Amino acid sequence: MEDELEPSLRPRTQIQGRILLLTICAAGIGGTFQFGYNLSIINAPTSHIQEFTNETWQARTGEPLPDHLILLMWSLIVSLYPLGGLFGALLAGPLAITLGRKKSLLVNNIFVVLAAILFGFSRKAGSFEMIMLGRLLVGVSAGVSMNIQPMYLGESAPKELRGAVAMSSAIFTALGIVMGQVVGLRELLGDPQAWPLLLASCLVPGVLQLASLPLVPESPRYLLIDCGDTEACLAALRRLRGSGDLARELEELEEERAACQGCRARRPWELFQHRALRRQVTSLVVLGSAMELCGNDLMYAYASSVFQKAGVPEAKVQYATIGTGSCELLMAIVSCVAVERMGRRVLLIGGYSLMACWGSIFTVALCLQVAGVDEGWRVQARLTSTSPLPCPWQSSFPWTLYLAVACIFASILSFGIGPGGLVPLSLCPFPWCLCLWGHLHWPVPS
């Protein structure tokens, strides 16, 4: 009897698996993928945008901008992205409750379309202010999607796959970083004349999400608890789970609905005043703060200069940088598989411990490198009667640079296996505390 039923059940199971996979991809391509993509594409056109800013200012006033003001303008362009992300994180909670998870992600692409238009026409318009406004808008979009995507996927996935599905957010972030690095190559859109197209290419993931997300169901939890529509909730569950026994899951949602009756959505600061949630919220703040302050962004920031000093030709540094993003992507995929077997706690403790180890060795290696250079200058000063020429001097410890390069890759690998994929779905109830988690990603600019 089981052999007769197996062929008929297998196609239906495959269909449900495809719908869940499509849900993950549709939410991720315009969600955390967009975040990682816009985070990395800004690195390639740095000098080109600075030149454009200076030329635009000179055309308006007849005088070039001083170097420190060019740096200030560039700092504003970069930092408006996390500022927009903070605004987007504040919008995510009300949007998720008012419009629903899926519709919020779709509406969120309005910010991406507007930003792409500003980026694409900024050069013709001779306006670096359009770049600033565009960066602010893509930041708002990233802030909204980084909150709503894990909420939507966590509510759509079956309980036994929830941890792995939540880790998919980290995979799409790492994939976005790598794709941004690849598209920013000089052979593609990293050319001095193509930087407006490079920045405007954020429109492509947005269009893909607009085309694919309407094909998948809304969050069953939102349909039942926020909308009170039992029939729509059951229909969404059937599309996501199949026609099996859904009574238990529906009963759990009904219990949660009864518990939420009369409760209003809490603001982030009100969560700290709720005794029942205080321990979970404290854990959330500690984990979020540790993730932002662990030093992974520091490794990305130092990578290019360390590669150059280690002997990598300047024209090839961009390819070595792609390797750093690929390491995080690889470990995000590994952690997605390992989280259900090993648990989040083991991956977190192991990841942070390894990062502390590699970070300490990285610091010692750079200190030895600087000490070696200083020693070289002193030796030259003793050997010559005149002052040494102001030219670079090889360190007495050249091997420390290779050690620093190895530590960069090792630290990024350690971040990807644990902290990079952390989305604390089980710590706090939706959507209040998950939005607080999203707020913690933006105070420290990436």
Image (cartoon, grey):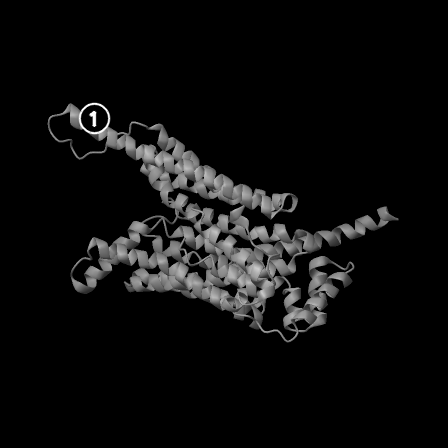
The percent coordinates of residue 343 (x first, y second) are 62, 46
Residue 97 lies, in percent from the top left, at: 57, 70
Q: Which residue lies furthest to the right in this view?
A: 1
Going by the image, does 130 lie left or right of 214?
A: left
Left or right placement of residue 267 versus residue 159 in this view: left
Residue behind mark 1: 379
In the orientation shown, which residue stands out farthest toward the left? Answer: 386
The residue nearer to you, when weighing 125 against 380, is 380
Q: Label 1 sits on what residue type?
A: Val
Q: Is residue 399 visible?
A: yes
Instruction: Spot the residue most to the front.
Output: 275
Q: Quadrant of residue 202?
A: bottom left
- Please report the residue visible at 58 percent of the width from the left and 65 percent of the height from the top: 275
Residue in the foreground of this view, choosing between 32 and 44: 32
- Does 116 sit left or right of 278 as displayed? left
Residue drawn at x 54%, y 41% as measured from the top left: 350
Q: Toward which corner of the image does residue 382 lie, by quadrant?
A: top left
> Mark 1: few, some, or many residues within 10 Å (few <14, many ≥20)?
few
Label 1 element class: helix
- Image location of residue 307, percent across then percent down: 36, 37
In the displayed structure image, the side of residue 32 where residue 258 appears, left or right: right
Confirm whether residue 207 shows in the render: no
Say which of 43 and 4 sits in front.
43
Residue furthest out toward the bottom: 262
The relative height of residue 167 versus residue 397 in the rendered view (above or below) is below
Residue sitting nearer the eye, 171 or 338: 338
The count of marks equals: 1
